[in-house]
Image (cartoon, helix red, strand yellow):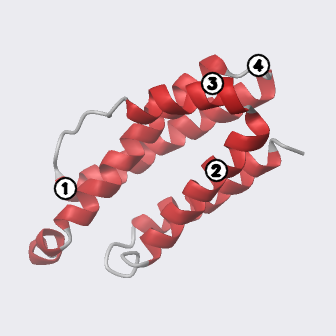
Amino acid sequence: MDQKLIDQYMDELIYAQQGELDAVLMYNKLAEKVKDAKDAAAFKQLAAEEGRHASVFHAYTKKVLQPKKTKAVFVPLMYSIAGRRVLYPIIAKQEYAAADKYKNIVSLFPDVESVMNDETRHGDIVNGLLK
């Protein structure tokens, strides 16, 4: 991989890596909070996949980042206050938005294509929990 290209997109790659790490923590905390076992299993699966996504970006950035706890605190709290019918569509929308952002860099960083596809599938999974 061309290091100049990586350097040119470093901020975007680090931002994506951070977002994926934050999602790991958020989904794990949400899995602990939700009442439905099927939802908890889905969130644990999504957390594991988000961890793989973070490693895809880490391969480019070579940066060791720590997850930020903001979403891991806020999202489970929102679940307690607003419930799954309000929260899950918001999470799904964020997953679809991540996929859209990755469309911009997938031609430059081919490994990101699997991440982009997973994010769309994640949105579908979270929406599917409401059916």
- Residue 41 showing in the rendered view: no
Decide if residue 113 is in sight here: yes
- For label 1, the SS is helix
Labels 3 & 1 near each other (Cβ < 8 A): no
Q: Which residue has dot 1 on it? A: 61
Residue at x 62%, y 35% (from the top left corner):
45
Q: Which image quarter holds the N terminus?
A: bottom left
Quadrant including the C terminus: top right
Frontmost of labels 4 and 1 is 4
* Mark 3, residue position: 31
* Identity of the residue drawn at 38% across and 82% down: 107
Give the label, 3 or 1, closer to the camera: 3
Task: Name the residue that disc number 2 marks.
Answer: 90
Graded by Cα atoms within 10 Å as few (under 14), some (14 to 19) or many (20 or more), the crowding at tag 2 reads: some
Q: Secondary structure at mark 4?
A: loop
Which kind of residue does numbered mark 3 sit on? Ala
What residue type is disc 1 on?
A: Thr
Q: Are marks 4 and 3 in contact (CB under 8 Å)?
A: no
Q: Residue at position x 75%, y 35% from top?
A: 84
